[in-house]
Amino acid sequence: MKITIIGASAGIGLHCTRLALEKGHEVATLSRRTIPLPDHANLRRVQGSATSLNDVRAAVDGAEAILVTLGVKSPFATTLFSDSARILLRGVEEMGSSPILIVLTGFGTGESWIYNSLPMRMLFTLLLKKVYADKSEQEEVITSGYPRWEIVRPGRLTNGAMTSRYRVLDHLVNGMRVGAISRSDVAHFMLAQAEHPTYLGKYVALTY
């Protein structure tokens, strides 16, 4: 199938790209930086910005599934996530089809905030509050403006190996524990959902 990965130059996006190519998919990527992968017959690279409509148009053209894996390194206030979500919906609308959108955010966005552990809530308040506020807005833009979506909220990300064994939690319940999960396992889940979506319209937490 034809898969677009937005934010593909590192982390989960890079893992998604590698895995999708290994499984024989046609992959288009959008990233500001060069993707550290060799040329591949099934890989089409668009170097640009997720907040540029022209760049997004070029990347999503013909996509059957779009994986959004954007991230930032700075804890400072940003509008990258919400701005890119609005641009993406415009690009998809112009395309005239309805690919599934699988959007990476994080456990702690939206209503999941109050289900985090106390230490994590303190960490978010001190370091990540502004970033997660924009990720929450990103979720709202996508879920209120498009019918075919999944929101993926992993716990604390690690660089561990892919195990393909993790818990998928699609309901918020008191006492739930959402801890660590490797970036490669998050990529495994996102690609599996691109191939066979089973959590449409749901907010999914991932953890071991």
Image (spheres, rainbow, N blue to C red):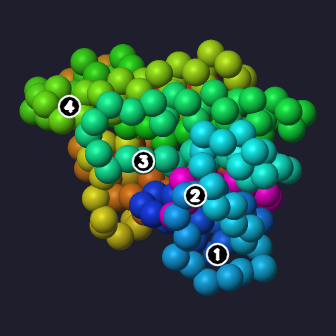
Instruction: Give the x, y percent position of residue 134.
Output: 41, 27
| Residue 22's disc number | 1
Q: Distance between the residues labelled 2 and 1?
A: 20 Å
Mark 4 or mark 1, whichever is nearer to me: 4
Mark 2 or mark 4, whichever is nearer to me: 2
Instruction: Give the x, y percent position of residue 200.
Output: 64, 31
Q: Can residue 109 be seen in this view?
A: no
The boundaries of the magenta stretch are 1-9
* Type of amino acid under label 4: Phe
What residue is at 20 percent from the left and 31 percent from the top?
Answer: 124
The 10 Å Cα crowd at callout 3, few under 14, some 14 to 19, many 20 or more, is some
Which residue is outermost to the bottom? 38
Q: Earlier in the sequence, mark 1 or mark 3?
A: 1
* Type of amino acid under label 3: Gly
Q: How far apart are marks 2 and 4 (CA)?
A: 26 Å
Q: Earlier in the sequence, mark 3 or mark 4?
A: 3
Q: Name the residue under label 4.
A: 124
